[in-house]
Image: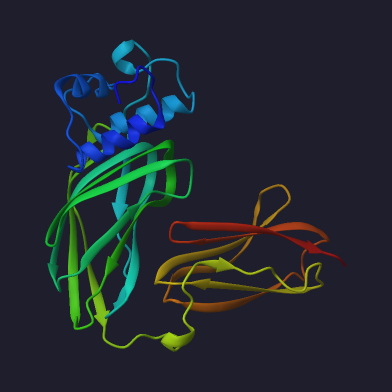
Amino acid sequence: SLNGQVTMQDASLLFDYLAGGVHFNNLQRYLGEVSGLSGLTAYDGALITQFCFEQFPLFPVEGGIVEMYAEGNLSIPEITAYAGAEFELPVQIENGFNVAAFEADISLEGEPVVLLEIAGPNQGVWFARFSGEYPQCDLYLGGSEPCNGNQDLLYLTFHIPDTAAGSFSMLLSNIVLNETEIAGQVYQEIDIQSTRFQEPESIMPETFSFEPAYPNPFNPVANMVFSIPMMSQVKLTIYNSLGQEVEVMESGALPAGRYSRIWDATRYSSGIYIAELIAGNNRQCQKLLLVK
């Protein structure tokens, strides 16, 4: 931003520049290249974000030591979409290491779906942008907390036209993790159904919600109710007070709707437990008190 300070606004502007939303002059392009490598990339934006969170004192271009290498295997799960609706499609990473930034080309074929939004994972602060429209878009993602292990790396929200039928395919190519080019491509075909398997439109939820569990305190069962406004990858997990996973109540893709899950804690001891609900890029937790 040329104000003499490094802020989160600089990271946001850099991602806007990558997606073609703003113009940079030569000085801005020079200052934004904090990785010390050629050209502005999503990893430069990720480094600026991490610098703002005081994760290192100097950028690589200034002689700082910042791990740039990243790796991981990407995949897109099989999901059914519904005509006339929005749905969220995760891009998942397996055996990820130090992934703080992601770039890729996305090619779409088949039904002319509309890419509405791209969002980062449920950790730290992430900037996400895309440019272009059907059938070709460019994706840019970077954040404050690198992804490791197995998790959702990003979420793509699409709108499916009312008249759509059959399927569409998505191909990710020219994939870059941080500054590391990843060999190969990621492909998935998405089936489109003309009839939604869900509650009537008049009572469909408009927002994500995780209602208070009841009863609470409880013994031995608690009922948990949640709502999702669009098809999403949903995971409902119970943890003990030490943060250890106790039980997974739900894991998979669900269409928009209101859902109820019963947790039977008969075999567990009294104490405080945490119920964590993740639906797409939404996350909410609540405490449960088991009293026997």
Task: Name the side, left or right, on which 13 lies relative to 231.
Answer: left
Can residue 149 be seen?
yes
Task: Name the side, left or right, on which 215 lies relative to 252.
Answer: right
Q: Residue furthest top?
A: 63
The x and y percentages for residue 226 are: 57, 72
Residue pictured at 78% horizontal, 68% vertical: 216
- On-image quarter of the C terminus: bottom right
Task: Name the side, left or right, on which 268 lies relative to 135.
Answer: right
Residue pictured at 27% horizontal, 33% vertical: 14
Residue pictured at 35% horizontal, 18% vertical: 59
- State the residue in front, 200 or 283: 200
Tell me the quarter of the picture where residue 277 sits.
Answer: bottom right
Number of numbered discs present?
A: 0
Can residue 79 be seen?
no
The x and y percentages for residue 79 are: 33, 71
Task: Name the side, left or right, on which 101 lies relative to 51.
Answer: left
- State the residue in front, 117 or 268: 117
